[in-house]
Amino acid sequence: MTTTTKEAVQPAVVDSVPEERRRRRRSTGEDALFRPRGVFKVIIQILLAIATVITLFPFYAMVIMSFKAPTAMTFPDSLFPTDLTISAYAYVLQSDEMLRWALNTLIYSVVSVVLVLLLSSMAAYAFAKKRFPGRTPMFWMIIAMLMVPYHITLIPLFVMIAGADGVNTYWGLIAPSLANAQAIFLLRQFIIALPDELLEAAKLDGASEIRIFFQVVLPLCKPILATLGLFVFLWHWNDFLWPLIIAQTPEMRVLTTGVSSLMRESQPLNIQLASAALAILPIFIAYLFAQRYFTQGVTMSGMKG
Amino acid sequence: MSWRNRTVRASAIAGLAFVLPAFILFIIFRFVPFIGGFTLAFAERTLGGEFTWVGMDNFERLAADPLFWHSLRVTIAYTLIVVPLTLALATGLALLVRRRFAGVDFFRAAFFMPVITSLVLAGIIFVWIFNAGGPVPRLMEALGLGGQSWITDRLLALPAIALVAAWSAFGYYMLVILARLNEIPREIEEAALVDRANAWARFRYITLPELRQVLFFLSVLSMVGSFQVFDAVYVMTQGGPVNATYTLGFMLYDQAFRFFDFGYASAVAVALFVLVFAITLIQRFLMGREDKA
């Protein structure tokens, strides 16, 4: 047998490896080379196990204790899956308050995601592909705002929104987060790499500017819009400080501020925990299905908060 | 007007039309409040709700306020716990889940779960975990360290919040470090392996130098975040006990929205801004020096 190509060699080599080891090699790839052995391997496994248990323990405690009666919260008995009751969930799911907070959170998150993605991609497209007066200073002004910590703008924002009667309104809650410098920056990086020929071709076909944007640019941006949208959603779902100061009435609270108000009112622990678990659940479900986008979002760097 | 000029002009008009909605929102909701933040620090809100100029009064009051200096010390102490803890956890665990092995995806996913969880919601269970009778004090009791609640203890409340913050953030930093680890050419490490360099030597002389820059960047990110900590403090301790966890971020909120002293709170915000900005500038300076070297 001549060995001119790699493909010709490989079957013979692989066949000499036992089936079980071959399967392992395939699943772990070349990393098998670095796999620790002996006592080292055991230490690593123990460390990983400890880290995982500590990381997941709060979730376990939260869920298991949300199924306990308020009188059965003494450690360590409260952590055993015995005497479970759904009374806390029955109570929480029947309360209009919790439903309202969930609805508010949904409105806050979904409206913000849609508007941030739309406005940011429009601006990013112009910054990336159009020439117009003031382009560079406008872009740098937006990028400079990336360096400004949120806290310095907090009080003036509140004074402004309050002055425009925006306290305890949806628009007051949503409007300030629509100016998202990170989204514009990341989208511009992406759109600038799109080939000009595609846009030129659409223009020659007589497509209007609006059509080019919606039917050529936006579809090409789908992957980054998905990642970005997910992170904007997550950020709004978990947002706390702004809703805390701007949405003060019980009917206008979101889940984070609502559930923390249960805590401050010293509601029974199982009620607090059931509410918290329900508020976290949608994010976990999203994570389950879109883990890849979460990971991509992190590697795009600096996207948390 | 030539055809060329017309298309250039049409393109400019379209460009402006696409940019302006976002840009106007930026002016209103970022730029004006940014300027406003500095302006309010020189003003005071009267009982009627109007603002009057008070010059440097707020800053003079700040400089003479023991609560501010206390709060600054608390914030620095908190940062000194959180930053090393988070980065050590993130680096260590990134190295452990770096190579593919059976179950690695489970570990990576598990470590990321706290990142996507609201710290406010998780705070409820953490208060139970650190409170008297909860797992942590009971564990300490079993070890003979006394079983007092961390939440109401003046020395332990801040470390409790720092631990919760590290729990919430390390998975994020771990993923960033993992991404950097994947960029290290494997030939270098394979060569070291052939030369029988042990794991520690490979980490010390190959991996760690490669990670230097990303660890530096992440430590700045973590410092900036720690300086502004608010959520965990609000939920777990409300700044207490006896102001033991009264951080600058919490002071800002407390002065503005409990005492409605917007001018004074803005002075706190300016101080916070200067600190965060200084950290960022030092980072830029050091990074720039590194690039030239």
Image (tube, coloured by chain):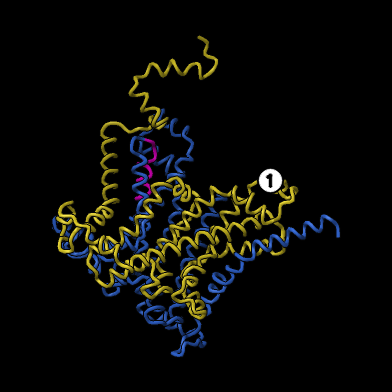
Q: Secondary structure of the magenta portion, mostly?
A: helix
How many numbered discs, if any? Answer: 1
User: In the image as oriented, which residue stretches furthest toward the bottom?
Assistant: B48
The x and y percentages for residue B7 are 78, 56
Residue B6: image quadrant is bottom right
The x and y percentages for residue A142 are 59, 63
- Asked if residue B91 lies in the magenta stretch, the reply is yes
The structure residue drawn at horizontal position 57% and vertical position 64%, both measured from the top left corner, is A144
Residue A19: image quadrant is top left
Query: Judging from the image, what is the letter of the chain drawn in blue?
Result: B
The image quadrant where one finds the N terminus of chain B is bottom right
**Residue A123 versus residue A90: which sits nearer the camera?**
A90
Left or right: B274 as drawn, with respect to A198? left
Residue placed under numbered mark 1 in the picture: A198
Q: Give the range drawn in magenta.
A: B89-100
Left or right: B231 as drawn, with respect to A92? right
At label 1, counting other C-alpha atoms closer than 10 Å, the crowd grade (few under 14, some 14-19, many 20 or more) is few
Query: Judging from the image, what is the letter of the chain drawn in yellow?
Result: A
Question: What amino acid type should be assigned to the residue bearing mark 1?
Answer: Leu
Could one spot residue B188 in this view of the protein? yes
Left or right: A232 as drawn, with respect to B156? right
The structure residue drawn at horizontal position 35% and vertical position 65%, both measured from the top left corner, is A99
**Residue A150 versus residue A225: which sits nearer the camera?**
A225
Q: Is mark 1 on a helix, strand or loop?
A: helix
Q: Which chain carries label 1?
A: A
Could one spot residue B159 in this view of the protein? no
